[in-house]
Amino acid sequence: MAKIESPQIESHLNDLYNSISGQQSSTGEKINALLYFESIVVNSSVSNRLINSAFMNLLVKMLKTVKTPQIRVRLCSVIGLLIRHSTVIENEVAESEVCS
C-alpha cells in the first residue's frame, strides 16, 4: 500500500468505506470488506491513519445500530485491531469511550 500514490490510496479507502457503510451492500459484502479491513490494519501506519479518521466514527456508529451478529463480530474485531496496532490515537478517539 505504501507504493501506491496518495490519490489511489484515498480512492481505495473511499471504496472500502462505501462497501462497509453502503445501504446497497449485502451482508456478505460488508463482512468481506471488514475482513479485508482486518488484514490491512495490522500495519501500524495504516492503523494510525484509519483510527483517527471517519472510519472509526463509522465503525462505532454501526456497532450501535447493526443487529446482524456476523457484522457485529467483525466490527468488534476491527475496532480491537485498530486500537491494538495504532501507535498514535488522537484525544477525540481516546475520549470517545469506544471501549464502553
Image (cartoon, grey):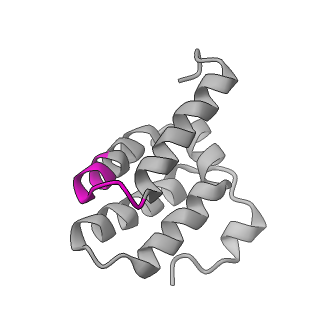
Seen in the image, is 21 located left or right of residue 68?
right
- Residue 73: % across, % down: 29, 67
Q: Is residue 30 magenta?
A: yes
The residue shown at (52%, 71%) is 60
Task: Please tell me whether residue 66 is drawn above or below residue 35 in the rendered image.
Answer: below
- Residue 11: % across, % down: 59, 32
- Residue 93: % across, % down: 68, 68
Instruction: Give the magenta range.
Output: 23-32
Seen in the image, is 90 located left or right of residue 98?
right
Query: Outermost residue, front direction?
Result: 24
The residue shown at (54%, 64%) is 58
The residue shown at (77%, 67%) is 91
Seen in the image, is 79 located left or right of residue 44?
left
The residue shown at (53%, 32%) is 12
The image quadrant of residue 69 is bottom left
86 vs 8, nearest the viewer = 8
